Amino acid sequence: MAEQPSELEQSFERLQKLISQNEHGKIVKLTDTILRLSPGDVDALACKAIANLQLGEYEEAAKVLAHRQLQQEMHFERAYCCYRLGKFDEALKLLGFVGEAHASGALQLAAQVHFRLDRGQDCVAACNKLKAAGQVSSLELKTNLLAAYVSAGLSAQLPELMRQLGIKPRDSFEIAFNRAVGLAEVGDEEAAETAVKAAYKQGEEALFDEEFTEQEVLGELAPLTVLLAFLLLSSGRAAAALDKLQPLVAGDIHARDIAALAANNWAVASYLTDAQQKGFYSRSIRKLESLLDKGSAGGSLALDPDIATRLNAQQKQLLHLNRALLYLMSGKLDQARELSGQLLAAYPGDASVIMLRAVLLARSG
């Protein structure tokens, strides 16, 4: 008479079924059961880690991947987990151990990490390796390659790159957006404004077709609104820029980096529209201070991690510099001096920071 499968064997059979059904939440629970029956089981640990990653539970995934049984395995998954947790240097180190099976994924992830570290040239180099290997086939990867070129200061090359990739702005609003950013970067602001407006209309149509709500569409297209507001500000249309930014500042934008840029540009547009409006300085200061990581030991330059890991160095400097100017103009000289001192240490030789320090010294008599 055949023996009945053990509880462990039955659990693994159920696990296989759940994996085929992509039931990631149930996989986590079942692997916990398996690990109680068989502590340190490598297969169960690996399944749990991948399920955690699929669920976006990166802290939990990191704990599982740190298990000694997996230390010499799953380098790609560990690198991806570090990337999602903002541990970019550690992610790059781990990518050096990734095997051939994940070579393409490793290059894609390396490009994303370099992008977040504001290393545009390294990002483009990784993307070009993928391109040379014929592995830039999806629309998402092509869009990322455009963004990488913009980040590296190669916006002038976008038309030729798009020709090589066989893509046009009408293919997606994300591509249209990157093309608009590229036009703005090379100084063709009129064409950039036309392009971003077309991209916004294209995005609205696509998202409403997917049954997004108005608030969801506002959030998804917030990067385009911020770019349009910047272009309006640059051409002296502060009131029009303020109208565009007000819904973003008043709403709940999920992407903290975009919310930060919206708050910064809103403060500038508000000042240019009417700096004497009641409560302008207090409201603007509160908006910019809300972007800080109050629990950090990094002082006045410590931004919320979701913002700090997504903005480039120039964007972060402008956020702090504008806050320092608001302190100065509202008479909060102690805060202005403290922040300007930290800015001078972080950006030595920067003309705007030096000018701010000079004004503060003059105010001190």
Image (cartoon, helix red, strand yellow):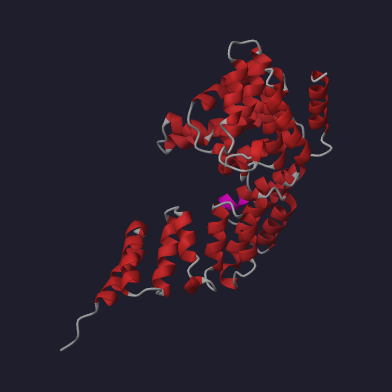
Q: In this view, does 189 lie to the left or right of 22?
A: right
Q: How many marks?
A: 0
Question: Which image quadrant for residue 188?
Answer: top right
Residue in the picture at 59% in, 33% down? 260
Start and end of the magenta stretch?
A: 138-142
Please provide percent x and percent y for residue 218.
Answer: 49, 30
| Residue ranking furthest to the left | 1
Where residue 327 appears, x then y in whole percent? 68, 23
The answer to whether one can see residue 171 in this image is: no
The single residue placed furthest to the bottom in the displayed view is 1
Can residue 140 be found in the magenta stretch?
yes
Q: Where, quadrant-wise, is the C terminus in this rendering?
A: top right
The x and y percentages for residue 283 are 57, 20
Main SS category, magenta section: helix
Vertical comparison of 303 with 110: above or below:
above
Visible residue check, residue 67: yes
**In the displayed structure image, the side of residue 275 where residue 247 appears, left or right:** left
Q: Which of 196 and 37 is in front in this view?
A: 37
In the image, residue 256 sits, relative to residue 361, either above or below, namely below
Magenta-span inclusion, residue 279? no
**Viewport quadrant of the N terminus:** bottom left
Q: Residue at x 44, y 30 (%)?
A: 215
Residue 64: % across, % down: 45, 64
